[in-house]
Image (cartoon, helix red, strand yellow):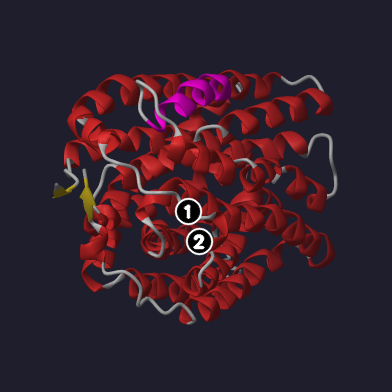
Amino acid sequence: MTTMRAYSPRGIWLLGFGFFSISITWALYNAYVPLYLEKFITQTALIGFMMTIDNYFAMFLQPWIGRKSDKTRSKFGKRMPFLLIGMPLAAVFGALIPWHNGLVTLVAFMVLMNLSMSLYRSPTVALMPDLTPADQRTQANGIINFMGGIGSILAFAGGAYLNDWHTSMPFFTSSVITLLCMVILLFVVRGQLQTDISAFERREEPKLTKFSAEWNRPTLFLLGAIFFWFFAYQGVEALFTLYGTNEMGMTDSEAAFSLAFFSLAFVIAAIPSGMLGNRFGKKRVILIGVIGLIAVFSLISFADSVLLLRIMLLIGGLFWACININSYPFIVQLGEESSIGTRTGIYYIASSVAAVSSPPLMGLMIDWQGYSVLFYVAAAGMAVALLFLLGVKDGGRAVANASSHTV
């Protein structure tokens, strides 16, 4: 029997709580951990390197975990077992980060939290295409990233307030939210989509393609683009609070709060970007986003006031939504339906290699040329991403064909 997978907007909104919790955790981590490290480490390049720990796990663990989840069968479904293990562990170790008593304990808590999050990031992301037909995935990705963006806004804005109250409160709060979101995913989302999950898992599974077969020509070009736009984005995100405090004279809380403007714009544009990608094509909307961020990053260093900086971050967030909302459904579309988790892992390989290399390299450039060079390097990364994106020939499988399954 051939049928299209059921699409439940309510279920996708609830699924977004997984992204909500991840976004809160990473936003706080990227905002405050560099400030903790700065107390023990004077070289910006070394701080940037320390901020890439999570991406080493992502490079080596997440492709394997994603592929493992493609083949997992349990009473909790394909992906949920990984969430049920990883989320509680990440909550515990994340809450311990502010309680470090030296560099060794700080790094230990960082490593343990990042390792725990690596257990469930790929399975969480793969839940969306599992439960959504191919022609609705870009819109669904807009919804769940909208939820993630809300999480980032709350982290940057609320985190600044909580940090002024007590430095442990932002991380403690994010840990509680992570556990609550796990409960929602387990009892609410799974109940809402139980019929679809059961039908999906009862179908005869197609044979998994070889991992090497996933590296077709369009995928390679798209991965190159993904690498360079994440190179630009991750470096800015990891080092922005240091840029704000050292270049713009902000307080720690003001610098962290400024990032909320980027996240606010991302939230506003998340769902419209998904709709535009579905209507006009993912590649075309991504192109607009890349070109826009080249312009924003090229001009942002000329911002001579906090207000102007925040306005430009607001504009940049709109363009980032065009890129980020459409890129993951694009990479999934270029592969087989039987390997969604595997291609999720491939996506993380590209973004993680970028995140590993970007903060230390940008930190090295800052040590050499000063903080003003940060956004120029980011603009150059976006320019190279544009060249790779132009090489992606999106002539593969028709979306309509990809949305049907035998169950």
Residue occupied by mark 1: 343
Instruction: Determine the secondary structure under disc 2.
Output: helix
Mark 1 vs mark 2: in front: 2
Q: Earlier in the sequence, mark 1 or mark 2?
A: 2
Residue 162 horizontal/vertical position (percent): 51, 25
Residue 264 shown left or right of residue 361 in the figure: left
Q: Give the residue at mark 2.
A: 214
Relative placement, left or right, of 60 versus 317 is: right
The main secondary structure of the magenta stretch is helix
Residue at the image point whose x is 61% and y is 67% from the top: 378
Q: Is residue 169 visible?
A: no
Judge whether residue 82 is colored magenta.
yes
Asked whether, in this view, residue 100 is left or right of residue 130, the answer is right
- Residue at image point 59% right, 77% down: 384
Q: Where is residue 273 shown, x and y percent of the image?
A: 30, 61
Task: Identify the magenta region.
Answer: 78-91
Find residue 291 and report its horizontal and vertical position in percent.
46, 77
Looking at the rendered structure, the kind of residue marked 2 is Glu
